[in-house]
Amino acid sequence: MGYTVRSRLIAAYLATGVVGLAGFLVVPDGSLMQVVWQVAVGFLGAAAVVVGIRRRRPDVSATWWLIAAGVAGNAAGIGVETILTRTMTDPGFPSWADAAYLSLYPFAAAGLTLLVRRRSPHRNRSTAVDATTLTTGIGLLAWIFMIQPAAADPSIGLLGHIVSVAYPVGDIVLLAMTVRLLLDGATRNVSFRLLCAALLCFLGGDSAWAVVNQMSWEPGPFAHKLLAAVFLAGYLTFGAAALHPDVRAVARPAPPRPARPSRRMLVLLTATSLIAPALLLAEALTHRVTDALAISIGCAALFLLVVTRMTQLLAQLDLQSQKVRELAVTDELTGLPNRRAWNAELPRALERARRDRTPLSVALVDLDHFKRFNDSYGHPAGDRLLKEASAAWQAHLRTVDHLARFGGEEFVVLLPDATAEQARMILDRMREATPLGQTFSAGIAVLRDGESSDEIVARADEALYAAKGAGRNQVALAGL
């Protein structure tokens, strides 16, 4: 029943939205009825966001309250502009209508900031650099074709310059937040896609009007309606995003994003990095290099961002290489050095003992009846025994001692500067600390003059078998 009601709610909203768009396109362009349709569609979108908050109860509901306020304010600007135009001979620029229009940007930016923080709790520097690179490249285009021309108009005064620049700057901020959302790797459900589509409607509509203004083109009635309909579609899409049941999961945190960019991202970053030189080349070919300073700053910023990204990738590569090296000499189950690490460490220890004329002992340790334990309790219990035993034994070794996993249930201990009796005492402490009620047998060999690594390990192995043959749960010493 609940699902049917929710489906009917969304269906009714979409049907109402379609009627609203159709009505707007049908009424005469420039008429008061057209303004009524525009404001009504905007308020419908804001109301739908509020209903979605109350019905769906999404995480980070503040994001959606802020979006609702921004949509309502932007839609109200249409009505305010109409009232000022019809009641004043020259309302001037800027006016209160611009304040209403511009309210969308700070509200939406604040809401999206909260959403980004919830979706990306981990500080992902690589994503931030990628988003900044894309925004910088597009921001350079906005500066040359939108911000600079608006700031250069001498007829609108200081406040007019500020307001004119605020529109493209607001678009750049929304673009940055949209790119950041798309790159965070978190949930991309229906509600998330609708939210991004709504943002792109406003960005696309503003960009289209910027192109129209740059070309000094006066759109006809139908073209004017189509351009305005883009913003109305944005209002309605915000409402649909909040009404959809998936809105509850939009703020779900994302796992850490891999530092290595995808091929698609590499293409985007490459194209963005080429925007500045492409602009300079275009101006040079037309013999009108009028934006050299802006392009130079853009080139420098993009270059530094690319270098930063390369530094991150190199750091990630170094970290992965270090992990590979550690895995190559570390036993995955116990975290102890493995046989490869032991084979590298033992010859060095023998050389130090001979050089310093100090004793050195090697012990082989084998858990008693490990196969029986595995068969009785299962392999997970056997793995647990190996991990807990290695940790318990490690706690009873000296700082200079070296414990490694030799293979299976067999371990090897390197005991520098330890006589036979000292080695036996250490091994007895280890044996008593063996967890889960288990025991081990061990064989100790003390280094002889001229003895090789293989020879001392072989003698320790013989002593181990002697300990097993004598009844297990004991330490045997190889003959000196």
Image (cartoon, helix red, strand yellow):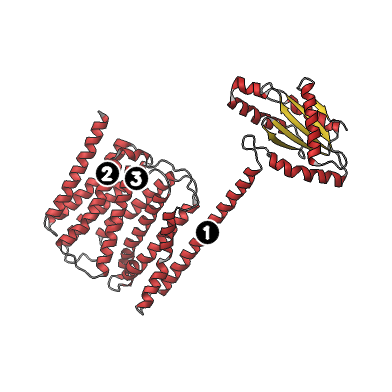
* Observer-nearest of 372 and 12: 372
Q: CA distance from mark 3 to mark 2?
A: 10 Å
| SS at circle 2 | helix
Image side of residue 96 versus residue 274, left or right: left
**Are the residues tagged 2 and 1 within 8 Å (C-beta)?**
no
Sequence-first disc among 2 and 1: 2
Is 53 displayed left or right of 418 in the figure?
Answer: left
Q: Look at discs 3 and 1 and give the one toward the viewer.
A: 1
Which circle's residue, 3 or 2, is located before the other in the chain?
3
Provide the residue designation for mark 2: 240
84 on left or right of 424: left
Check if mark 3's residue and mark 2's residue have beta carbons within 8 Å.
Answer: no
Residue type at mark 2? Ala
Q: Which residue is mark 3?
A: 192
Question: Badge 2, how many Cα within 10 Å: few under 14, some, many 20+?
Answer: many
Q: Amino acid at mark 1?
A: Met
CA distance for labels 2 and 1: 40 Å
Quarter holding the N terminus is top left
Relative vertical location of residue 165 with respect to residue 236 in this rendering, above or below = below
Up-down: is 179 above or below 464?
Answer: below
Residue 332, by quadrant, is: top right
Q: CA distance from mark 3 to mark 1?
A: 30 Å
Mark 1 lies on a secondary structure that is: helix
Task: Quickly name the residue at label 1.
Answer: 310
Q: Secondary structure at mark 3?
A: helix
